Image (spheres, rainbow, N blue to C red):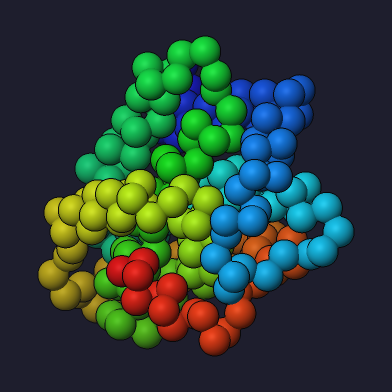
Amino acid sequence: MSDDPYHFIQQCIDRAVKAEQERFRFRRSLHDTLPKLHRSIQLPQRDAPLHLTCFVIRYIQVVPTWLNQMDTLCHAAGLNFRPIRELIIHSFRSVPERQPYEHGLGSILDEAYLAHRTMEEINDILQPQCGTPLLPMDPMIANLVVRELLGESLSCQLDNLSELLVRRFEPEELDPAHLVSMILCKQRFEDDPGSWPDFAQHMQISLHTRSLEKQLDNSH
């Protein structure tokens, strides 16, 4: 058994990506989904389902790495990330129970969204104390696009769950030694920017600014 607590999540992701590569089920489903997406989401005109599928794959694939790095940053700051880690891992473990005959991208997209939104919330809590964001890229656009794919009802449930997780985590003010330790740890991650790709931008996916403010109000 691997000592990496995120190994199970990685296995779930690998199976889902392999299933998509073999059956293209998620990509085909987007032909029905695209007309229903909010008009603020701007996609490439050529083969939008392929671009959106590639975006979703990258969004899901970075979850173990991002969680591991957030875990490391919190440890450097003297914060206990374990309860959040265990609950997110548990959410991935429930996927086969809910969909035993189909383990594709759609079956783990909500778990990935929960992980991303939780990290976004933790970043928002800790950034004022350390004076710099813990996440080198802003996940807002990516999360709003995935929110549209999941639908309003499920997204709201996951947002509420994320807030509950973070509420248990919310730390007191960091002491100076831990604060310096966390900042130094973050700088080491910045030396390897390829681990934190702005996949929404790379996939030529953006939000129309006139609709952005309304989307933000509905997502928090």
Quarter of the view holding residue 176: bottom left
Image x and y of residue 139, in percent: 51, 66
Q: Is residue 109 left or right of residue 200?
A: left
**Residue 149, visible in the rendered structure:** yes
**Taking 84 as reference, is 26 above or below it?**
above
Image x and y of residue 188, in percent: 55, 65
Quarter of the view holding residue 23: top right
| Residue at horizontal 65 percent and vertical 53 percent from the top | 34
| Residue at horizontal 76 percent and vertical 23 percent from the top | 22
Viewer-nearest residue: 133 or 108? 108
Looking at the rendering, in which quadrant would you find the C terminus?
A: bottom left
Q: In this view, does 153 lie to the left or right of 150?
A: left
**Taking 141 as reference, is 94 above or below it?**
above
Viewer-nearest residue: 55 or 35? 35
**Residue 192, visible in the rendered structure:** no
Viewer-nearest residue: 114 or 78? 114
Viewer-nearest residue: 101 or 164? 101
| Residue at horizontal 28 percent and vertical 38 percent from the top | 87
Q: Is residue 194 left or right of residue 186?
A: right
| Residue at horizontal 77 percent and vertical 47 percent from the top | 50
Instruction: Count the numbered circles shown.
Output: 0
- Residue found farthest to the right: 46
**Taking 114 as reference, is 117 above or below it?**
below
Image x and y of residue 108, in percent: 49, 35
Image x and y of residue 158, in percent: 32, 49
